[in-house]
């Protein structure tokens, strides 16, 4: 029945897929914690205005991809297509500007209505970080370094190339915008319809066009690097020197841009060639004008987001689940003792499998299917002697262990 299938563009996470996803976000959370990032979780849906104002009314995300609905109270709500806007809203709502800088890490599902394909789903997952209240170039260096550290820990950094560009400060960006308008206006008849619509509203977005005719014009368009003012050049130099100091390799990419006006200075992406067309696995930049555009105070910010599905596809393999201990009671008298033993072992940190029913042979078959590392047998003889029969399921070696020494014995073999 069609109504029992996952909705197109969504999928269930279980088994190997689930282990890969969990490995990505748990690794990211742990490393972000070493850099002083606290975790935040924002609602999956927000008022539509939160995203419309931050992503731009004319962006493809807002006009074509957002899951927006009116609730029973007449409010316009949207499932989050990304999480920077939600974190920025939370920053304003909760008065977090009282303790700056604020360094936040998040992970969770995002939603966009688009054509499902490899590496791109309608419900997808992201990890991300945001630094709010730090206007220094060293903040940009740190967030890029943190991204590289996470990718390295996952074993995928060598499969990516860091692309880097400067968007300049607002003054440089405004001058670049004027120069782009002048250039593309001279070729307006050759632009695609989408790019003609963007020409006077958001000309930087033309640089992202996938249309072949547009791309030919973009190849000859002015470069931001040619009109950076001194303040922007100084900031850019501090970022690149910081990355050089840390030994983080990068490729200068003068066509890497962000279309919205609140983006400034650093833009970056870690790009791979191993996932087909979906090459960007982690990307971000500085957005000093975002909080102000949402009605908050002047507040610098920088951060990135990474697609968990794409990272999960790149890693060689997720860590295996811990192999359990299988307790096998023999006879009705041993059932209660087996449950008591299972509770003790679980409280001590062991993974324990204890079936609800079945003869010893049936329980051992299940233990084999689960990849148990050892079996603990309890029968009348063991109960009377105060021991547990411990069998290593790898070697088959078996010995009786006094009940009071079992935890220490297991710790030796783990």
Image (tube, rainbow, N blue to C red):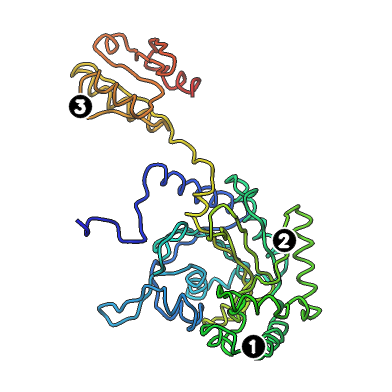
Q: Secondary structure at mark 1?
A: loop
Q: Residue at x 72, y 61 (%)?
A: 251
Give coordinates of residue 393: x percent, y percent: 40, 18
Q: Residue at x 78, y 66 (%)?
A: 238
Give coordinates of residue 338: x percent, y percent: 28, 23
Q: Secondary structure at mark 2?
A: strand
Mark 2 and mark 3 lie on one chain; the one further toward the N terminus is 2
| 120 relative to 28, above or below | below
Mark 2 and mark 1 lie on one chain; the one further toward the N terminus is 1
Q: Give the quadrant of the N terminus.
A: bottom left
Q: Residue at x 71, y 77 (%)?
A: 168
State the CA–CA distance, disc 2 to disc 3: 61 Å
For label 2, the residue is 251
State the CA–CA distance, disc 1 to disc 3: 77 Å
Give coordinates of residue 302: x percent, y percent: 62, 68
Q: Secondary structure at mark 3?
A: loop
For label 1, the residue is 187
For label 3, the residue is 357
In the displayed structure, does residue 108 sit left or right of residue 388?
A: right
Quadrant of res 228: bottom right
Quadrant of res 377: top left
In the image, 238 versus 217, the foreground residue is 217
- Are dots 1 and 3 in contact, CB under 8 Å? no
């Amino acid at each position: 029945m069609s109504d029992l299938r996952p909705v197109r563009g969504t999928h269930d996470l279980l088994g190997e897929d689930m282990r890969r996803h969990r490995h990505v976000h748990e690794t990211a959370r742990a490393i972000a914690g070493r850099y002083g990032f606290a975790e935040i979780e924002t609602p999956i849906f927000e008022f539509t205005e939160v995203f419309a104002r931050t992503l731009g009314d004319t962006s493809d995300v807002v006009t074509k991809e957002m899951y927006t609905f009116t609730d029973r109270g007449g409010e316009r709500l949207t499932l989050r297509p990304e999480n920077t806007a939600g974190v920025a809203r939370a920053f304003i709502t909760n008065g977090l500007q009282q303790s700056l800088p604020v360094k936040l890490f998040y992970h969770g599902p995002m939603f966009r209505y688009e054509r499902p394909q490899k590496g791109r789903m309608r419900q997808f997952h992201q990890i991300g970080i945001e630094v709010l209240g730090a206007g220094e170039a060293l903040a940009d260096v740190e967030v890029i370094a943190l991204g590289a550290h996470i990718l390295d820990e996952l074993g995928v950094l060598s499969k990516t190339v860091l692309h880097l560009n400067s968007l300049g400060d607002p003054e440089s960006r405004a001058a670049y915008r004027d120069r782009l308008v002048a250039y593309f206006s001279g070729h307006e008849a050759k632009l695609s319809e989408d790019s003609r619509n963007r020409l006077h509203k958001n000309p930087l977005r033309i640089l992202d066009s996938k249309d072949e005719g547009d791309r030919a014009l973009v190849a000859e368009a002015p470069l931001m690097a040619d009109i950076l003012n001194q303040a922007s050049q100084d900031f850019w130099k501090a970022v690149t020197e910081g990355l050089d100091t840390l030994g983080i390799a990068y490729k200068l990419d003068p066509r890497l841009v962000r279309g919205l006006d609140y983006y400034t200075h650093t833009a970056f992406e870690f790009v791979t060639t191993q996932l087909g067309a979906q090459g960007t696995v982690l990307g971000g930049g500085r957005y000093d004008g975002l909080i102000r555009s949402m009605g908050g105070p002047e507040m610098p910010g920088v951060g990135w987001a990474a697609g968990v599905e794409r990272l999960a596809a790149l890693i060689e393999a997720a860590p295996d689940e811990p192999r359990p201990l299988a307790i096998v009671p023999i006879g009705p008298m041993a059932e209660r003792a087996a449950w008591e033993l299972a509770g003790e072992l679980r409280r001590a940190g062991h993974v324990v499998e204890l079936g609800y029913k079945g003869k010893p042979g049936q329980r051992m078959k299940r233990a084999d299917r689960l990849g148990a590392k050892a079996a603990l047998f309890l029968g009348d003889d063991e109960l009377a002697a105060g021991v547990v029969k411990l069998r290593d399921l790898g070697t088959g070696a078996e010995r009786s262990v006094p009940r009071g020494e079992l935890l220490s014995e297991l710790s030796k073999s783990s």
